[in-house]
């Protein structure tokens, strides 16, 4: 039987024990927190939005970079002080840090339990053990767990955009990345359960869905009764697009080694699939790409860009960059800048290399680029990307885009914000529209990060 979809708003008073969830990291972590809330609600917990009311605090963590972990450790120190005020309070660490740091986290005086991404179903049981004075840990990886039977309890306060996980884990083993160690092997979710969840999202008034996977292009589901009956990502994307022509469909993340033209043709066929592809390149140097174990070359990456622009001329492309990876030379860095100039990305996420223990890079290479050089190179990448983003936004000035109203602007309660199909943030006066509405916005001016316009 299909579990009824629930969209819970935080409450401050309830006869149920109160649960506070804090989430760090990527969209997958946000979706995981929604799965956790579904599990906990079914066991009699009610969501609250302040730690002062909480009987249980769960912090869902990220291990991609050291600064993400340091933020979590800082929060644990705060939760320790909270436990002094309320000794019965239980604190659990979930997600990627749980899998990476294990006993080190359990030894923290604030922490009562440590739970990895594949063990969320065990949370009520583990909390029961913690209430009896134990300090349980469950970080085991389950190659079959996809949480496909659960309907996540959405945490988006506006009820506009929802995340739907289509797969879990990763097989890529990039040299710098901890994901395969903390999230396990790649496994794709049954497409029928994905379609069911998307239909639930639509039935509950959501206007946009983002399909999530560490590498959506490698999605491949085989029918257990007939292994030759397979479904790939382009076919899944079509199924989701056909659920409702008014539903906006996005997806992340694509991997250059697996991306094919089939996805591009599907995007071209269905106007409700947004014209935006996040295609992380990480470096413009073949030497560094090889050392990173990315399994594509600079030339192959650029071929993807050519295909995107031929098949989807209005498609925005965003990317990721890592500055100062092991043995990166001035020439390697120059290759990255030249690739950026050649592609001119619309948006990008840019970081200094942060060594993570247990990865191939940590075990086999030397983190031998000086911190000041990393910072210098990152600043050059950021400056160039800001230049390209501004030029991209300036080309949109004078154009009119359909924008999904997502919420009130952080700078003024007289303005709304939303995103164009190209995933560009747009800010505009409220006029008479409401959150969740589609509006036509004419772009009047811009910054490197934002389009500024008016409803037409």
Image (cartoon, rainbow, N blue to C red):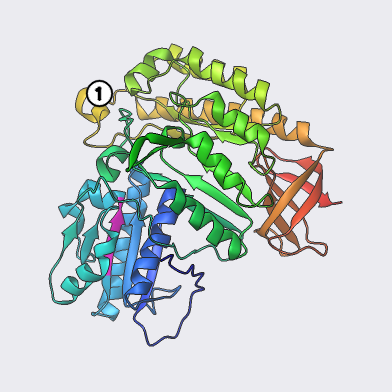
Residue 183 in view: yes
Q: Is 428 positioned to the left or the right of 106 in the image?
A: right
Q: Secondary structure at mark 1?
A: loop
Q: Position of residue 165 (x, y in %)?
A: 44, 49
Q: Residue at 51% of width from left, 52% of height from top?
A: 195
Residue 159 in view: no
Asked if residue 231 is positioned above or below residue 329 in the image, the reply reads below
Q: Position of residue 229 (x, y in %)?
A: 40, 36
Q: Position of residue 78 (x, y in %)?
A: 33, 66
Q: Residue at 35% of width from left, 17% of height from top?
A: 290
- The answer to if 94 sits in the magenta stretch is yes
> Is 398 in front, or is 329?
398
Q: Is 338 positioned to the left or the right of 114 in the image?
A: right
- The answer to if 432 sits in the magenta stretch is no
Q: Residues within 10 Å of mark 1 (few under 14, many from 20)?
A: few
Numbered disc total: 1
Question: Which residue matches tag 1?
Answer: 366
Asked if residue 201 is positioned above or below residue 425 in the image, the reply reads below
Q: Position of residue 389 (x, y in %)?
A: 65, 32
What predominant SS class does the magenta segment belong to?
A: strand
Asked if residue 145 is positioned above or below residue 92 in the image, the reply reads above
Q: Is 318 positioned to the left or the right of 373 in the image?
A: right
| Residues shaded magenta | 91-95
Picture quadrant where residue 372 is located: top left
């Amino acid at each position: 039987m299909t579990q009824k979809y629930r969209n819970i708003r935080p409450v401050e008073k309830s006869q149920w024990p109160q649960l506070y969830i804090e989430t760090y990291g990527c969209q997958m972590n946000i979706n995981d927190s929604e799965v956790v809330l579904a599990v906990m609600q079914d066991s009699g917990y009610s969501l609250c939005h302040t730690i002062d009311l909480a009987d249980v605090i769960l912090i869902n963590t990220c291990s991609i970079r050291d600064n993400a972990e340091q933020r979590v450790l800082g929060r644990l120190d705060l939760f320790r002080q909270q436990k002094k005020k309320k000794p019965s309070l239980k604190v659990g660490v979930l997600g990627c840090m749980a899998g990476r740091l294990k006993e080190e986290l359990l030894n923290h005086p604030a922490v009562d339990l440590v739970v990895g991404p594949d063990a969320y179903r065990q949370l009520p049981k583990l909390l029961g053990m913690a209430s009896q004075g134990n300090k349980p840990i469950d970080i085991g990886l389950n190659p079959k767990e996809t949480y496909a039977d659960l309907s996540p309890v959405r945490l988006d306060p506006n009820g506009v955009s929802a995340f739907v996980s289509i797969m879990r884990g990763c097989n890529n083993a990039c040299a710098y990345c901890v994901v395969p160690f903390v999230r396990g092997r790649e496994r794709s979710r049954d497409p029928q359960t994905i379609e069911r969840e998307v239909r639930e999202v639509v039935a509950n008034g959501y206007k946009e869905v983002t399909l999530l996977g560490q590498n959506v292009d490698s999605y491949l589901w085989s029918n257990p009764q007939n292994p030759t009956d397979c479904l790939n990502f382009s076919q899944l994307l079509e199924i989701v697009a056909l659920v409702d022509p008014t539903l906006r469909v996005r997806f992340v993340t694509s991997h250059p080694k697996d991306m094919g033209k089939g996805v591009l043709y599907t995007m071209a066929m269905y106007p409700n699939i947004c014209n935006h592809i996040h295609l992380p390149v990480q470096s413009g140097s073949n030497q560094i790409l090889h050392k990173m174990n990315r399994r594509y070359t600079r030339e192959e990456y650029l071929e993807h860009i050519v295909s995107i622009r031929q098949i989807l001329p209005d498609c925005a492309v965003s990317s990721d960059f890592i500055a100062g990876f092991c043995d990166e030379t001035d020439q390697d860095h120059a290759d990255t800048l030249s690739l950026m100039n050649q592609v001119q990305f619309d948006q990008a996420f840019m970081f200094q290399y942060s060594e993570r223990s247990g990865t191939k890079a940590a075990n086999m290479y030397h983190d031998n680029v000086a911190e000041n050089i990393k910072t210098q190179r990152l600043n050059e990448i950021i400056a160039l990307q800001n230049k390209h983003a501004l030029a991209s936004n300036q080309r949109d000035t004078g154009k009119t885009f359909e924008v999904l109203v997502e919420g009130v602007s952080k700078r003024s309660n007289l303005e709304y914000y939303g995103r164009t199909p190209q995933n560009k943030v747009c800010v505009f006066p409220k006029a008479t529209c409401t959150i969740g509405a589609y509006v036509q916005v004419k772009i009047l001016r811009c910054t490197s990060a934002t389009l500024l316009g008016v409803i037409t």
